Image: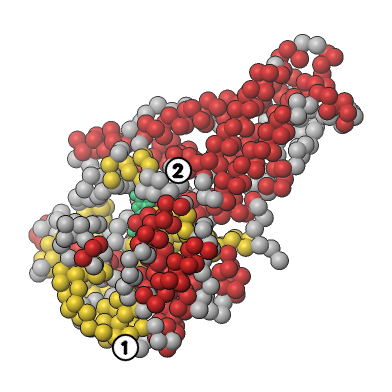
């Protein structure tokens, strides 16, 4: 049976748009998965969104939309981003999916039946930002360390999960499996935490306070705590308990998270699994935090979105490479445009790009662009010329790469590739093919040198595949290799003399151009001067015409408009689309009621109606939206209400 590999990212909260941190973790998942495929494993990669809880309700309220509309919108933004980053996932799970909800209910019931959940009154300090109770010793100067706000004291009857029962068992498990949580610093952090008595976990929220969640199967007046719901996505995505996917992949599961969510993953989750009788995960891989321009990422500093835009400026593979090369997995790292450019220019354009060009140019110059033929020579003769060095350098690089990748030490894996690049550059200087080319009698040796260099390049391009899939393919094409295959397996990379002599290779092209700084902050400054805000968001993936045609777009004439009480941004409109409709539109920031009445706008008329501020809204008016303005689409000249727009 083929060995399997199941890798997960956290499921991201939909209370804000995706940013660099989310992109990094998900790229790590993609890199790990592509590497395992190179090893011949059958892999499954899960990502998704976490959609219940207080945080989401508050974010939806802020936008004056229902939680459902809100979560759909943000979840779609995450889903649309991953293909743009060339991330190949197998499943995108949402905690509002019916199958997920059923699994959460199943597990809650199972743990309730086994007696690990009890009901009790509790008075404690609750941080609404974190959606959890805090103990005195967890607070810093009496405040929640994450939200820097004093928690509120609340008294409630709730359901508790008997985590304390499992404390000794968990400590023992971590000791027996030293790489259960890795890198080591995070394992130590969890063990340090477990040195203090572990408190039971409050796993319910009364519906009087929070309705947006999964109802407890054993008490309809409560929903479950968002973390209890969210963590179970890792099994529900595989259709636990009976699904084929679960049986196939669960035993090989590894999670990736950042240090912010170490505690739920390092403590709650293994205990939940144990209590539910589900085998534990193999590894929890924990990475550090990205800062941007040496500052914590923050919406108010406006440094959250821009890093993602750099992929459009410098190229996706350069962006992926930079993230994976720059962050030592486990430690914090800094993202800035200048360092990205330096990495591009030194590692990619200079070291790798030049090597590629040099070798391919020499192949054209000395062998008319054909991989030299070694067939006529005997092995002994070849051996005499073979430096031996390059072959063993490549073998060493592959071993170092593989072991670093196994340990999620991606920056080390990349360094091992660059060691090979540097050996190849040295090899060229040592063998001086241009000197060999001067004498006919050196022809066999020249052929061997060029052949070995081409083989070295094949190995380099193969090892780069998980990080830079597109560039790796481009390199394969430049080496005259079969472009039908996206990648070479590790076994193929280990097979020296794999390339077929006689194959023609194309003329050298520049793989990685050098870059000058094209600062996004400059662009942002210009935008501010011209009154525009933000950078243009990336384009969404293509859709087919029939997908677009499902939206029924009509000309709507605005008949009346009035403000919606208690909603600063909303106007209630009566429109004519051949019949009368009521629409609640978020345009009050840009139009007074008088300004909008009489306009002919474009409206989506077949959206499911939604209730906004108690008013049923029966359609959506198309508008151009940025951070400050919402400007409606109008029709150029008067036309009959209800006319089709296409
Ligand atoms: O915590 N640097 O969701 P979330 C690196 N829904 N990675 C970062 C980062 C940064 N500055 N900021 C965020 C949640 N991340 C829960 C998870 S899982 C069952 C539930 C990444 O949207 C990193 O992976 O706050 C971090 O762990 C995750 O986003 C937190 O995402």
Q: Position of residue 233 (x, y in %)?
A: 44, 70
**Looking at the image, in which quadrant does ligand 1 appear?**
bottom left
3D distance between C-alphas at marks 2 and 1:
46 Å
Name the residue rendered at 44%, 57% in the picture. 187
Horizontal side, residue 84 vs residue 509: left or right:
left
- Point out the image quarter for the C terminus: bottom left
Residue positioned most to the top: 438
Q: Position of residue 353 (x, y in %)?
A: 56, 28
Mark 2 surroundings: few (<14), some (14-19) or many (≥20) residues within 10 A: some
Q: Which residue is mark 1?
A: 219
* Badge 2 residue CB within 8 Å of ligand 1: no
Q: Position of residue 148 (x, y in %)?
A: 19, 56
| SS under mark 1 | strand
Compared with residue 469, is residue 125 higher up or lower down, i.e. above or below? below
Horizontal side, residue 87 vs residue 3: left or right:
left
Q: Which residue is mark 2?
A: 328
Q: Is residue 258 visible?
A: yes
């Amino acid at each position: 049976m083929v060995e399997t590999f199941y890798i997960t990212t956290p499921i991201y909260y939909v209370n804000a748009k995706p940013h660099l941190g989310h992109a990094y973790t998900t790229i790590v998942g993609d890199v790990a998965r592509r590497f395992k495929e190179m090893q011949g494993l059958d892999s499954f990669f899960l990502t998704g969104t976490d959609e219940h809880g207080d945080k989401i309700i508050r974010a939806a309220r802020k936008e004056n939309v229902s939680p459902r509309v809100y979560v759909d919108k943000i979840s779609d933004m995450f889903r649309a981003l991953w293909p743009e980053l060339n991330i190949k996932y197998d499943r995108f799970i949402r905690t509002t999916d019916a199958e997920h909800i059923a699994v959460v209910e199943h597990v809650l019931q199972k743990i309730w039946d086994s007696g690990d959940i009890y009901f009790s009154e509790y008075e404690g300090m609750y941080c609404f930002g974190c959606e959890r109770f805090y103990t005195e010793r967890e607070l810093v100067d009496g405040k929640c360390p994450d939200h820097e706000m004093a928690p509120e004291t609340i008294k409630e009857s709730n359901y508790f999960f008997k985590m304390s029962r499992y404390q000794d068992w968990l400590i023992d498990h971590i000791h027996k499996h030293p790489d259960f949580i890795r890198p080591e610093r995070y394992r130590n952090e969890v063990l340090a935490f477990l040195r203090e008595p572990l408190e039971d976990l409050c796993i319910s929220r009364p519906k009087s306070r929070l309705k947006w969640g999964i109802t407890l199967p054993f008490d309809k007046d409560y929903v479950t705590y968002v973390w209890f719901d969210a963590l179970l996505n890792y099994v529900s995505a595989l259709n636990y308990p009976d699904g084929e996917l679960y049986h196939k992949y669960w035993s090989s599961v590894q999670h990736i998270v950042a240090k912010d969510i170490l505690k739920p993953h390092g403590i709650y989750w293994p205990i939940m699994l144990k209590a539910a009788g589900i085998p534990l995960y193999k590894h929890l891989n924990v990475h550090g935090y990205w800062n941007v321009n040496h500052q914590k990422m923050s919406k108010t500093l406006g440094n959250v979105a821009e890093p993602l835009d750099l992929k459009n400026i410098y190229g996706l593979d350069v962006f992926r490479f930079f993230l994976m090369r720059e962050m030592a997995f486990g430690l914090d790292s800094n993202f800035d445009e200048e360092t990205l450019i330096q990495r591009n220019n030194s590692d990619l354009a200079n070291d790798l790009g030049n090597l590629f060009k040099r070798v391919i140019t020499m192949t054209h110059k000395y062998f008319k662009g054909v991989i030299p033929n070694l067939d006529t020579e005997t092995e002994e003769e070849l051996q005499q010329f073979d430096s031996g060095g390059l072959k063993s350098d490549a073998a060493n690089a592959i071993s170092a790469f593989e072991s670093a990748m196994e340990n999620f030490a991606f920056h080390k894996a990349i360094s091992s590739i660059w060691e090979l690049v540097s050996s190849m550059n040295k090899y060229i200087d040592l063998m001086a093919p241009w000197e060999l080319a001067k004498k006919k009698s050196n022809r066999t040796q020249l052929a061997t040198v060029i052949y070995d260099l081409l083989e070295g390049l094949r190995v380099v391009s193969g090892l780069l595949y998980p990080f830079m899939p597109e560039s790796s393919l481009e390199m394969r094409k430049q080496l005259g290799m079969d472009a039908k295959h996206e990648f070479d397996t590790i076994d193929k990379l280990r097979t020296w003399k794999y390339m077929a002599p006689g194959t023609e290779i194309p003329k050298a092209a520049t793989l990685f151009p050098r870059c000058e700084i094209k600062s996004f902050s400059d662009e942002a400054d210009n935008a501010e001067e011209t009154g525009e805000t933000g950078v243009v968001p990336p384009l969404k993936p293509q859709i087919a015409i029939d997908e677009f045609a499902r939206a029924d777009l009509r000309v709507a004439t605005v008949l009346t408009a009035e403000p919606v009480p208690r909603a600063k941004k909303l106007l209630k409109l009566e429109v004519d689309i051949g019949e009368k409709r009521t629409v609640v539109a978020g345009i009050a920031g840009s139009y007074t009621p008088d300004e909008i009445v009489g306009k002919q706008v474009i409206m989506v008329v077949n959206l499911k109606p939604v209730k906004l501020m108690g008013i049923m809204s029966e359609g959506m008016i198309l508008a151009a939206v940025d951070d400050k303005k919402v400007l409606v689409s109008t029709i150029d000249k008067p036309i009959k209400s209800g006319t089709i727009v296409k």
